[in-house]
Image: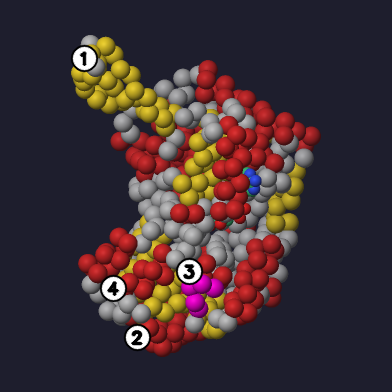
């Protein structure tokens, strides 16, 4: 049995245990067994992290010394690269990522994103000359100055923790903020290893802290309600995002939210290799057992080719029925769900789909026989109406729903009839037609004809209840900055 190293806090420049040496067990999603221990931060630990972050922002040159920050963050990136094996072990054992998913967002894609942010940093404008104006008969020379917001509380989820941690921590620190990172209780190690490596890189005390804790709420709410924290950057569920907005309101702090999704994948009737494209779409929804916010889990296919689409999907599920769930198989991209709670939630939706009258085409069962962990079969419902809850609510498991549409207008209507607006896909033999549809979908990132819609040099984020703000790229760094005008009488 594998045991991961103990996940420790990183506060005021020190890697250490929680007050009173309190720890909690972390669980392997593959087996349901204890896989390691993590520090269980007390309110006193969180208080110290906030106080030192505030001091480091107010009393040191961290926010203004761009070269220092870029140099130290480059060191941190290099240390992450050098520790790839440790990161991969955490991804596999603590997060339950299949080996085939580790080179993607789980480890290598995340670290590559860090390198991209280091490059993007060089394009940030810190100051701009906005020229002279004569107003009310007075001449004034103006500049805008772009500077860090202040102390950031970064609250992250369990599905792709390194990727989300890097997006928030690297962007916030590059902007000149000081950052306190609070990971999800199930997956502390991708955060705590960043703390350890920041200490090794020689980060000044207090500019970056990591607090893991068993309770999902207490540490997060302390960050959200504390007046010394200027900005909360949160990735997680829409329900918790709403609560954070409400609670953050009392101190009017900036709140930047990356939330859930139920993205549509529209395959048009003129798509070349229609059956193959539809079959592949089905498999894509199983990546990381469907635990990805931007996975297009609503497949929209033309009524005129519906029977053909359903046959291709069924064939795809049958052909790949056993190609998942083996922790030693490098070609697998799907492992277990993160926890028993998530397994119960996904199984609840599968039962709901049956009750709502959708037809279960593939999968539908929990599979503890795969190794004792939290496995659910790749699952697909067809004959789904967009009004059904399984078409409207985020399931966050390997469950795809298939909905027929009449024509382009109908496809756009169905895609947009959702509270969410995170991502989407359109495929057609006619690029102009697909692009016209993409322009009308109310979502932040859309792929046309297989284009990669999420890369670390470009902004990512949601419309509607999928979030507020943009992560990654120049826009992602600018989320952590304020704009000041300095106007000088001429
Ligand atoms: P979650 O909302 O349950 O928890 C996310 C984080 O918030 C965790 O660290 C948790 O401990 C913390 N938290 C919980 N209650 C809190 C509170 N009241 N105050 C402050 N913090 C609190 O989400 P999850 O289950 O960890 O992750 C899955 C969700 O994340 C899905 O909805 C998914 O769509 C979303 N997600 C979105 C993106 C994106 O970029 N849009 C990326 C990944 C995941």
Question: Quarter holding the C terminus?
Answer: top left
Question: Residue shown at 38%/78% (left/top)?
Answer: 405
Q: Earlier in the sequence, mark 1 or mark 3?
A: 1
Q: What residue range appears in magenta?
A: 384-388
State the residue position of label 2. Answer: 304
Residue 399 in view, yes or no:
no
Between label 4 and label 1, give the one nearer the viewer.
Answer: 1
Question: Quarter holding the N terminus?
Answer: bottom right
Question: Residue shown at 36%/74% (left/top)?
Answer: 410
Give whichever of 196, 277 is nearer the camera. Answer: 277
Q: Position of residue 475 (x, y in %)?
A: 37, 42
Q: CA distance from mark 4 to mark 1?
A: 59 Å
- Of all residues, the one furthest to the top in this rendering is 490
Q: Position of residue 482 (x, y in %)?
A: 41, 30
Q: Main secondary structure of the magenta part?
A: loop
Give the quarter of the image for residue 249.
Answer: top right
Q: CA distance from mark 2 to mark 4?
A: 15 Å
Q: Position of residue 279 (x, y in %)?
A: 41, 78
Disc marking residue 57: none
Disc marking residue 297: 3
Vertical relation: 106 (above or below) 132: below
Between label 2 and label 4, give the one nearer the viewer.
Answer: 2
Q: Is residue 42 left or right of residue 206?
A: right
Question: Residue shown at 46%/38% (left/top)?
Answer: 170
Q: Earlier in the sequence, mark 2 or mark 3?
A: 3
- Of all residues, the one furthest to the right in this rendering is 20
Would you say the beta carbon of the disc 3 residue lies within 8 angstroms of ligand 1? no
Between label 1 and label 3, give the one nearer the viewer.
Answer: 1
Question: Residue shown at 53%/79% (left/top)?
Answer: 381
């Amino acid at each position: 049995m594998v045991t991961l190293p103990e996940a420790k806090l990183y506060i005021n420049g020190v890697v250490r245990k929680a007050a009173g040496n309190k720890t909690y067990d972390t669980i392997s999603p593959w087996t349901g067994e204890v896989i390691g221990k993590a520090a269980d931060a007390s309110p006193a630990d969180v208080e110290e992290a906030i106080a030192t972050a505030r001091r480091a922002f107010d009393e040191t040159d961290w926010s203004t010394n761009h070269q220092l920050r870029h140099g130290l963050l480059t060191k941190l990136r290099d240390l992450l690269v050098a520790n790839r094996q440790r990161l991969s072990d955490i991804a596999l054992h603590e997060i339950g990522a299949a080996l085939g998913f580790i080179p993607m967002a789980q480890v290598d894609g995340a670290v590559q994103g860090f390198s991209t942010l280091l490059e993007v940093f060089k394009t940030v404008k810190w100051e701009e000359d906005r020229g002279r104006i004569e107003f009310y008969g007075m001449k004034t020379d103006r500049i805008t100055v772009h500077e860090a917001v202040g102390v950031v509380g970064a609250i992250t989820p369990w599905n792709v923790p390194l990727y989300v941690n890097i997006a928030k921590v690297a962007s916030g620190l590059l902007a000149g903020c000081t950052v306190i990172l609070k990971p999800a209780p199930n997956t502390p190690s991708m955060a705590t290893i960043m703390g350890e490596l920041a200490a090794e890189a020689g980060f000044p005390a207090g500019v970056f802290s990591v607090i893991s804790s068993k309770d999902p709420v207490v540490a997060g709410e302390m960050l959200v309600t504390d007046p010394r924290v200027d900005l909360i950057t949160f990735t997680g569920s829409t329900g918790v995002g709403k609560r954070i907005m409400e609670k953050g309101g009392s101190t009017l702090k900036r709140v930047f939210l990356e939330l859930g999704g139920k993205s549509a994948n529209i395959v048009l009737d003129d798509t070349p290799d229609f059956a193959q494209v539809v079959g592949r779409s089905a498999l894509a929804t199983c990546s990381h057992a469907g635990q990805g916010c931007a996975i297009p889990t609503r497949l929209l296919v033309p009524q005129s080719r519906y029977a053909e689409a359903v046959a291709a999907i069924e064939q795809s599920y049958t052909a790949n029925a056993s190609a998942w769930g083996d922790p030693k198989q490098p070609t697998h991209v799907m492992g277990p769900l993160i926890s028993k709670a998530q397994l119960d939630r996904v199984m609840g939706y599968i039962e709901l789909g049956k009750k709502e009258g959708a037809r279960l085409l593939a999968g539908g069962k929990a599979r503890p026989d795969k190794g004792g962990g939290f496995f659910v079969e790749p699952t697909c419902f067809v004959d789904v109406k967009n009004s059904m809850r399984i078409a409207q609510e985020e399931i966050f498991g390997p469950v795809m729903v298939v909905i027929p549409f009449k024509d382009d207008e109908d496809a756009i209507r169905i895609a947009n009839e959702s509270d969410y607006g995170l991502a989407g896909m359109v495929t057609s033999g006619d690029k102009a037609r697909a692009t016209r549809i993409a322009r009308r979908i109310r979502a932040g990132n859309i792929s046309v004809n297989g284009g990669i819609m999420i890369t670390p040099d470009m902004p990512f984020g949601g419309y509607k209840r999928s979030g507020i703000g943009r992560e990654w790229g120049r826009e992602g760094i600018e989320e952590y900055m304020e704009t000041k005008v300095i106007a000088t009488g001429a």
